[in-house]
Image: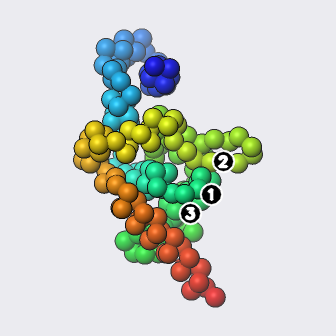
Amino acid sequence: RFRWVDCQLHSLEALEIPKAIWKALTRLPRDLNGIYSEALQKIDDVHSDSAHCILMWLLYGYKPLKLDQVADILAIDLEAEKFDIDNRPLELQHKLHKIVDSTLVVIDSARGQNVVQFAHISVQEFLISELSSAEARNLFSINKELGHELIAKTCLIYLLQFNSWE
């Protein structure tokens, strides 16, 4: 329940007009699945590939991701199989929430490291659950095999790019 309240407060704090706040109060999702589904649906078409990539890495990666690593991951064009350092997102620390809503993903700055992680364990549970898979399938293909394939392909492109410079 605390997580649900926190997410609701987060969605309301962006509103400034009392009429908009009251209207939003009547439309609040009733559970966390509703909140997370709504957050997935809010992802811009412009950012959908990047958001998908970040979520897959967080779901199926084996180590926590530092912010710099996420920037490098997003600089990889999977279709062209190319890493372009000039495509690293600018000021990602301040703009990550524009790619993936902060109800889903946050940056943990504890211990002097900027680690990108799920906002709560319930986000991960939502994304891998059967119920949400069907809901999220319209937006993203989320499954373990595709996740590992995406991670492997990203790593190979990244490593081969540096190998070709030698």
Residue nearest the observer in this picture, 38 or 144: 144
Disc with the residue nearer the chain's start (1 vs 2): 1
Image: 75 above or below 97: below
* Position of residue 163 in the picture relative to residue 18 (left or right): right
Tell me the number on the disc at residue 72. Answer: 3
| Residue 79 percent across, percent down from the top left | 37, 71
Q: Are marks 1 and 2 in contact (CB under 8 Å)?
A: yes
- The quadrant holding residue 101 is top left
Disc 1, SS:
helix
**Mark 3: few/some/many CA within 10 Å (<14, 14-19, 20+):** some
Q: Position of residue 147 (x, y in %)?
A: 40, 59
Location of mark 2 (residue): 114
Q: Mark 3–mark 1 contact, CB under 8 Å?
A: yes
Give x and y (percent) for residue 41.
Answer: 32, 39
Q: Secondary structure at mark 3?
A: helix
Q: Earlier in the sequence, mark 3 or mark 2?
A: 3
Q: Quadrant of residue 112?
A: top right
Q: At 55% from the left edge and 40% from the top edge, which residue is drawn?
A: 106
User: What element does badge 2 sit on?
Assistant: loop
Instruction: Count residues near mark 1 (Cα–Cα under 10 Å), then give few for <14, some for 14-19, many for 20+.
Output: some
Find residue 29 and report its image quarter: top left
Identify the residue at horizontal 59%, vertical 84% (top origin): 163
C-alpha separation, residue under disc 3 versus residue under disc 1: 6 Å
Q: Amino acid at mark 1?
A: Asp
Q: Is residue 64 left or right of residue 19?
A: right
Quadrant of the image for the N terminus?
top left
Q: Which mark is residue 68?
A: 1
